[in-house]
Amino acid sequence: GNFVKWYSCGPTVYDASHMGHARSYISFDILRRVLTDYFGYNIQYCMNITDIDDKVYNASVTDNSIFCALPQFWEQEYFKDMDALNVAPPDVLTRVSEYVPEIVAYVEQIIKNGYAYESNGSVYFSVSQFDSSNDHFYARLVPEAVGDLQALQEGEGSLSSQAEQLNEKRSPNDFALWKASKPGEPSWDSPWGKGRPGWHIECSVMASSILGSTMDIHTGGVDLKFPHHDNELAQAEAHYNNSCWVKYFLHSGHLTIAGCKMSKSLKNFITIKEALKKNTARQLRLAFLLHSWKDTLDYSENTMHDAVQFEKLANEFFLTVKDVLRNQPDHGPESFNKWSAEELHLSSLFSKRQQSVHVALCDNVDSRTALDNLRQLISASNTYLATMHEKKSTPNGQLLRNIAKYITWIFKVFGAISQEEEIGFPISTAGSNTEEILMPYLNTLSNFREDVRNIARSHKVSEALELCDKLRDDVLPALGVRLEDKEGAKTVVKLVDKDQLLKERAEKKKAIFLKFFLRLAAAKKTAEKEAQRKIPPSQLFISQTDKYSAFDNQGFPTHDVQGKELSKGQTKKLRKLFDAQAKLYEDYLQSCLT
C-alpha cells in the first residue's frame, strides 16, 4: 500500500561526524523526501544510535559513567550537524543502551530456534547451521565475501581478540551476538553472565522492535553490506524463522577526497563542520544531487565548483523571473496576454522537461538526470527572455512564474530549499520577508538613478554618471543589492546574498586585473618579437662572448669559450637558430619595403 516501513543504520557516536556520514545521511534524506513529497508515500522512518560499541569503549577508564557521557555528547553534535545540513530527523530514534533487555530476549529466541550457541559467557551465531537450512541462505547481499575473516573480525570489534574468539567459536565464520565483558568494560546482566551486545544484533533487535518481522526499506553505506547487513538479515530471519526480513536494501556509494580514501593518516579527514566553512549546506546537497546516490562521490574542488555553478545558474534565473513579475500585474484579467510562437515553444519544452524529471525520479531516484532537465529548462527560459528582449516585447509573466514555481518545488522536494518560498531560494532575516519589504524602496531608488543617468547623458555630466556607477558597483553590493543595467530596457534589481555579491565583485576585479596583466604580457611579447625580427643573423651570436670565442665571416660561432671547436650536434642546433633568424630578418626587410 502507501505505508512504508524504513530503517536506517545510524552513526556510532564516538567522534565528530565527517563527510562520509554526510554522504549517507544526505543521500537517504533526499530519497526519503522524494518518496514522501513527490510520490506521496507515508513513511515511518526509524534510525538507531549506536552508543554501545568497541569504538566507544576503546579507552582506559575505570568510571563507567564516562561510557555514557561520551556518546551522549557526540549524539548531540551529530544532530547539530544534521540540522545544519537540513537533514530531516527520524520519526523514531533507537539507542542501543535502551534496548539491552530486548537484545537478550532476541538472542535467547535465536538459541531456542537452533541457530546460536553459548561459549565461555559469549553467544555466537552458527553460520553453518543457518546456511544448511532449506529456508535460509547466508550472505545474500555479498555471497562472495563468505570466509573473509578480516571483514568478519572488523565486525567483531577492536576489543575482541581474534585468538580468543577462534577458541570459543565452532567456526571462524561464526559471529558474536553477545560478548562476555572483561574487567574495566561496561556490562549488563544476561543468562550467560555479564556482557554486552555484539554489533550486528543491535540493529536487528531495534529495527524489529519498531517495524516488526518485516520492513520495506533498509539503508546504510555500501561498506555495511558485509558483514553487517548480511549478519543482520541472518539474525532476524533466524529469530522469526522467515526469509523476508527486508524487501529493499539501499546502499549509498563511497565518498573519496580528491580521488583518495578519507583517513586521518592521509590528513584528508574532513568533518561536516569543516566542510560547512567552505560551502553552504545547499551547495553540498547539490553536489550530492549531481551524482547518483549509489555511486562513489569524489568530494573535491571540481565537484564543489560544479555545484556552486549550478546554484548560481538557478539563482540568477529566479532573480530574473522575480524582476519580470514585479513589473507586471500579478492577478486579474490584465495579467494574461496572448501567447506568441515563443510562448508556445517554451510551454512545450516545459511539459517535456517535467515528464523527463518524472521518468528520472521513477528510475531509482535519478537526481542527476532530474537536475540536468532543470538545467535545460532554465537555459530554454533564458533563451526565451533574451528573444523577447531583442524583440522589445514583454515576456509572459504567468508562464515564467509557473516554470520558476515548478523548479522551486523540485528543489524543495530534494531538500535544497527549506523555507516556504513560492519562487527561488529564501532571502529572509529574523522571520521577516526581506524581499517583500525592501523591493518597493529599491525599485524607487533604481528609477531615480535611471532618471539621473539619462539627464547626465544628455548634458554630458560625467561626474554624475560616475556616481551612478559607484552606487551600482560599490555601495549597493555591500548591502546585498545588485543592479543590472540593460541597454534600451529598465534596470533589473536583484536582492541577493551580500557575501555572494562581495565575492562576485572581488572576482570581477581579479578578472579585470588578470586581463590587464595578460594584455601587458602579450604586448611585451609582441615587442620582443618585433625587436627580434630587426636583428641581422650575423649579429645573433656575435655578442655572446661568454659562450663562444670564434666566429666565421657570417657571424656563426665555430669555437666555445675555452677555444674548443663546436661539435656537430652543437653546430646543427645553432644552425637551426641561425637560419630561423635569417628568415625573420628577411621578412622584416620585406615589410619595410611594403
Image (cartoon, helix red, strand yellow):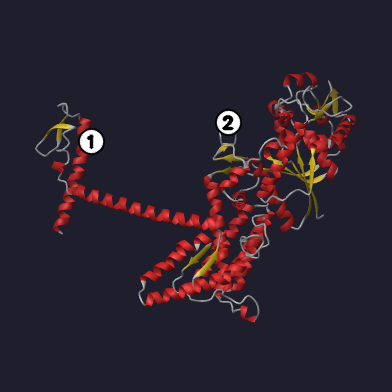
Query: Which quadrant, please, contains the N terminus?
Result: bottom right
Residue 489 shows in this picture: no
Q: Position of residue 204 (x, y in %)?
A: 81, 38
Pick the residue in front: 281 or 587: 281
- Rendered location of residue 28, percent (x, y): 70, 47
Quadrant placement of the C terminus: bottom left
Q: Nearer the viewer, mark 1 or mark 2?
A: 2
**Is residue 429 left or right of 94 when viewed as pictured?**
left
What residue would you read off at disc 1? 573
Name the one closer to the observer, 2 or 511. 511
Disc with the residue nearer the chain's start (1 vs 2): 2
- Image location of residue 243, percent across then percent down: 83, 39
Residue at image position (22%, 32%) is 570
Q: Which residue is mark 2?
A: 265
Q: Is residue 345 left or right of residue 225?
A: left
Q: Which residue is at a point 34% across and 52% down the rendered structure image?
A: 518
Residue at coordinates 73% horizontally, 22% vertically from top-left? 161
Q: Is residue 509 left or right of residue 296?
A: left
Q: Residues within 10 Å of mark 1 (few under 14, many from 20)?
A: few
**Residue 197 lies in what quarter of the image?**
top right
Provide residue 325's location: percent of width, then percent of height.
59, 72
Q: Residues within 10 Å of mark 2 (few under 14, many from 20)?
A: few
The answer to whether marks 1 and 2 mark residues whose Cβ atoms lie closer than 8 Å is: no
Give the mark count. Answer: 2
- Residue 257 is at least partly visible in this image: yes
Q: Which mark is residue 412?
A: none
Q: Say above or below: 111 vs 372.
A: above
- Mark 1: amino acid: Lys
